[in-house]
Amino acid sequence: MNEETFDKLEEIQQNEFIKAAIDRVGAGVVISDPEQEDNPMIYCNKGFEDLTGYKAEEILGKNCRFLQGEDTSSQMVDKIRKGLSNYENVLVELKNYKKDGTMFWNELQIFPVYIQQMDQNFFVGVQRDVSQRREQQELIGHYLSEVKRLSTPIVPLEEGISVLPLVGTFDEERLNEMLDSVSHHVKESKEDFLIIDMSAVHAYNEAVHMGIYQMNQLLDLMGTTLIITGIKPSFAIQSAPYADFSELSLQSYASVKQALNAVRGR
Ligand SMILES: Cc1cc2nc3c(=O)[nH]c(=O)nc-3n(C[C@H](O)[C@H](O)[C@H](O)COP(=O)(O)O)c2cc1C
C-alpha cells in the first residue's frame, strides 16, 4: 500500500468514525452548503432522520425550510435569515413539522464553519425536540395565571355590588394584578359599589396601603364607590407614611354585613 492510498484510507476511516459518532448524538445534525443555489442540505445524521421521519435520500439537496409549516413563527424565520446572511450563530425555538405532519418544537442552533482546506464556509445546524419542555412551560404558565385569577376573587353579591376578599400577602406585582382585574371587572359589570374585605389581612405593608389608595382613585374615575370592611385600627396609623387617606372619602365598616345594610338603606 503506497503512502497516498494509506492516507486516503485513514481519512475515510476517520470520516467513518466521525460519521458514526455524529449519528449517535441524540439530536439532529445537518450541514448545508451556502455556495450552492438556495443553501441546500448536503449532510444529515441519523438523529435528524429519527427526529423528522425523513430519510436522508429524500431531503439531501433541499433547503431545510421544508420542516416549516402553517404555525411556524415568521419572526423566528426572519431571525434565522438575518443571522445566516451575516454568518452569525443563530439560536431559535420554532414550530416544525415531521414527515407525518406532527408538530414539534425545534430548538435550532446554526453556526457557520469555515473549512480551510476547501476555502469554503458551511453551516452546521443542530435540532433538538424540546416539545416536552415547552408543554411543561405552557402548563406552568396556565396554572400561574389560574392562581393569579383565583387570588383576586371578585364575588358579585347583588345587583351593582361585589366584594373582593383580600387574602394572603401583598407585593407590588400582586397589587398591579389586583388593580388590573378590578378595573376589568368594574368596566364589564358597571358596579355601583365594590367592597374590599380586609378581615383576612393580618399585616399591613406598603403594598396594601398603596393598593387601597390606588384602588380608590381608580374606582372614583370609573364611578364606583369603594367600601373597606374588616379594617383593623392599626391600619390608619400605619398608612401615614405611604398614603394620605384623610383626603379620601373612604367608607369603612366592621364587616361585609354591616356594609351591605348601610348600602341597602342608602
Ligand atoms: C444548517 C441549517 C439548518 C437549518 N435547520 C432548520 C430547521 O431544522 N428548521 C427550520 O425551520 N429551519 C431550518 N433552517 C433554516 C432554513 O433553511 C432557512 O434558512 C430559513 O427558513 C430562512 O430562509 P428563508 O426565508 O429563505 O426560508 C436551517 C438552515 C441552515 C443553514
Image: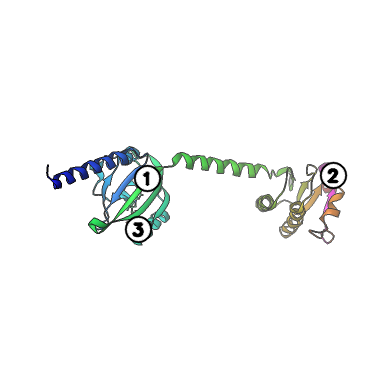
Task: Looking at the image, tell me whether mark 3 or mark 1 is earlier in sequence order.
Answer: 3
- Mark 3 packing: few (<14 Cα in 10 Å), some, or many (20+)? some
Q: Secondary structure at mark 2?
A: helix
Would you say the beta carbon of the disc 3 residue lies within 8 angstroms of ligand 1? yes
Image coordinates for residue 36, horizontal then vertical, percent:
23, 56
Instruction: Judge from the rendering whether residue 17 lies leftward or rightward of residue 167; answer left or right.
Output: left
Task: Please report the residue visible at 35 percent of the width from the left and 58 percent of the height from the top.
Answer: 84
Q: Nearer the viewer, residue 20 or 73?
A: 20
Disc 3 versus disc 2: nearer the observer: 3
Q: Where is residue 151 shown, x and y percent of the image?
A: 68, 43
> In terms of depth relative to the viewer, which is nearer, 205 or 24?
24
> Which amino acid, by three-letter code, is at mark 3?
Leu
Residue 222 sits in quarter: bottom right
Task: Evaluate if marks 3 and 1 touch, with contact meaning CB atoms under 8 Å apart.
Answer: no
Identified by mark 2, the residue type is: Asn
For the record, the magenta segment spans 247-260
- Is residue 266 in view? no
Residue 258 painted magenta:
yes
- Is residue 190 covered in magenta? no
Residue 117 left/right relative to 90: left
Element on which disc 3 rests = helix
Residue 127 is marked as: 1
